[in-house]
């Protein structure tokens, strides 16, 4: 929205922004957020404008756009984005908005095109966003070069694609370089999507992320997951047992022999990358803990690679193993509604029905996602009560949640301090 249009709505959101800032500044660190952050329409609008329109977001995988003209789309609030493969393998991202009268160019979630053509009046764009055709009636003074698609910042790293809607995005190079390094043995540009699920959780996006950032609930909720997964992934974790530390040391020697990085890397509170063992006797997140794909990823020679855990706030967590990977994307829909997409990735040459069974591959995380959905939705229902007040997190079991809420609070306050955004009409429902 241009500055003139924004100014029409400054006052309505200014009040909400000031109240949000005051609540964040007064909040007790180590406790959950005040109720409005989980269910209020205007604070949801603030979240979308100060977090999801300004931070780097996980959009998809490079394997989803393998050839020139292949594209994916995603919806970030009221903003539709196209990610498309162009000439010489280049990846471009654009606002999915025709420069003529604003129609969406692509209505499908994915596909392959020669050019990007608006279905309304057939304005046509090159895959790099340049306007190629605008009819014959635009007048002699019409400047084709001035009406290319509006670009969105995009960065590919380790097979992951990240986008940022901000004019001046946060730094991402160090994290991206680490992904390239840590994921190189897994050959993430040479994988394919073997299975995909999408669920709508009737809960605020922050509750969905909070639930992921702790395993305090795992013993009581996730029997399938705990068949292969340790509840912790760091030898400095106060819960880490001597047996776990011994397994870690042994596995790290194996991973070094495989040429696979494993050291825990943190990039502030936003990003975290670490390779950690799975339970002894298991090598993959499958019902029996054994490899679910016969053809291993990349150049790996063993499936026993533990889980490379990748956190990217605000909208992704991931597990990359020796035989397959599971990637997760979180996109808010409304104050109490969140879309969670899960994709299972395998070597591109693995043959379904021969090298893997997609139903078997997805059983553990299908069960876990369903369990987490119920937990998040019950959490939301409780928070909506007049009885709710912020409660304390456990520094031992919920330090990941504390880090997430601290990151969210810092980023929200920082963005609000930079510039109070305008409440868009679409957000004031």
Image (spheres, helix red, strand yellow):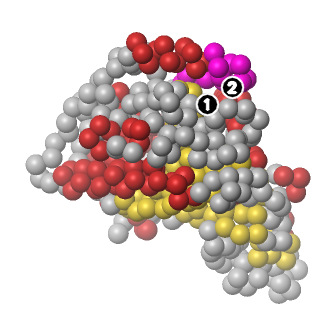
Magenta stretch contains residue 23:
no
> What is the number of the mark on residue 413?
none
* Residue tagged 1: 305
Badge 2 vs badge 1, beta-carbon distance below 8 Å? yes
State how far apart marks 2 and 1 are (Cα): 8 Å
Quadrant for residue 140, please give it.
Answer: bottom right
Q: Earlier in the sequence, mark 2 or mark 1?
A: 2
User: What is the secondary structure assignment of the residue under circle 1?
Assistant: loop
| Residue closest to the eye, 107 or 136 | 107
**Residue 246: % across, % down:** 48, 13
Label 2 neighbour load within 10 Å: few <14, some 14-19, many 20+:
many
Q: Which of 279 and 136 is in front in this view?
A: 279
- Quarter of the figure with residue 262: top right
Q: How crowded is mark 1: few (under 14 residues within 10 Å), some or many (20 or more)?
A: many
| Residue drawn 10% across the image and 49% down it | 387
Q: Where is residue 120 in the image (x, y as percent from the top left)?
A: 69, 84
Quadrant in the picture for residue 146? bottom right
In the foreground, 165 or 386: 386
Who's the residue at 82% across and 51% down the image? 90
Residue 113 shows in the view: yes
Q: Where is residue 47 in the image (x, y as percent from the top left)?
A: 42, 50
Name the side, left or right, on which 281 lies relative to 386. right
x and y, in percent, of residue 252 in the image: 60, 18
* Figure label count: 2
Q: Give the range drawn in magenta.
A: 253-266
- Residue 428 position (above or below residue 175): below
Q: Nearer the viewer, mark 2 or mark 1?
A: 1
Q: Name the residue under label 2.
A: 260
Residue projecting furthest to the left: 387
Q: Does the magenta stretch include residue 265?
A: yes
- Residue at 46% across / 50% down in the picture? 365
Residue appearing at x 75%, y 46% in the figure: 189
């Amino acid at each position: 929205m241009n500055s003139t249009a924004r100014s029409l709505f400054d006052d309505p959101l200014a009040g909400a922004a000031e109240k949000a800032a005051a609540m964040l500044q007064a909040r007790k660190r180590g406790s959950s957020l005040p109720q409005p952050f989980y269910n209020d329409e205007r604070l949801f609008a603030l979240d979308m404008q100060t977090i999801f329109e300004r931070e780097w977001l996980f959009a998809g995988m490079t394997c989803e756009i393998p050839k020139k003209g292949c594209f994916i789309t995603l919806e970030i609030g009221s903003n539709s984005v196209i990610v498309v493969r162009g000439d010489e393998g280049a990846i471009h991202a654009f606002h999915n908005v025709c420069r003529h009268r604003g129609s969406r160019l692509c209505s499908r979630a994915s596909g392959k095109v020669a050019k990007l053509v608006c279905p309304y009046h057939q304005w046509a764009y090159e895959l790099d966003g340049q306007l190629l055709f605008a009819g014959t009636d635009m007048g002699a003074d019409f400047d084709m070069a001035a009406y290319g698609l509006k670009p969105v910042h995009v960065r590919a790293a380790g097979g992951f694609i990240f986008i940022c809607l901000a004019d001046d995005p946060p730094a991402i190079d160090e994290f991206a370089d680490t992904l390239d390094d840590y994921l190189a043995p897994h050959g993430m540009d040479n994988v394919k999507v073997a299975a995909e699920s999408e669920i709508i959780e009737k809960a605020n996006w922050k509750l969905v992320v909070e639930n992921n950032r702790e395993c305090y609930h795992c013993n009581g909720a996730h029997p399938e997951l705990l068949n292969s997964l340790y509840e912790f992934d760091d030898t400095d974790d106060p819960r880490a047992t001597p047996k776990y530390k011994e397994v870690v040391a042994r596995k790290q020697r194996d991973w070094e022999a495989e040429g696979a990085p494993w050291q825990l890397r943190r990039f502030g509170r936003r990003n975290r990358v670490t390779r950690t063992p799975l339970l002894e006797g298991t090598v993959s997140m499958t019902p029996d803990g054994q490899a679910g794909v016969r053809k291993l990823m990349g150049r790996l020679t063993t499936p026993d690679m533990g889980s490379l855990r990748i956190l990217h706030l605000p909208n992704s967590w991931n597990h990359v193993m020796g035989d397959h990977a599971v990637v997760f994307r979180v996109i808010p829909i409304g104050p109490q509604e969140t879309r969670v997409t899960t994709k299972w990735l395998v070597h591109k040459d693995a043959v379904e029905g021969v090298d893997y069974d997609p139903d078997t591959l997805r059983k553990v995380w299908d069960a876990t996602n369903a369990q987490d959905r119920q937990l998040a939705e019950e959490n939301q229902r409780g928070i909506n009560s007049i009885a709710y007040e912020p409660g304390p997190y456990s520094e031992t079991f919920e330090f990941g949640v504390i880090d997430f809420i601290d990151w969210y609070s810092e980023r929200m306050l920082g963005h609000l301090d930079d510039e109070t955004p305008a409440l868009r009409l679409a957000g004031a429902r």
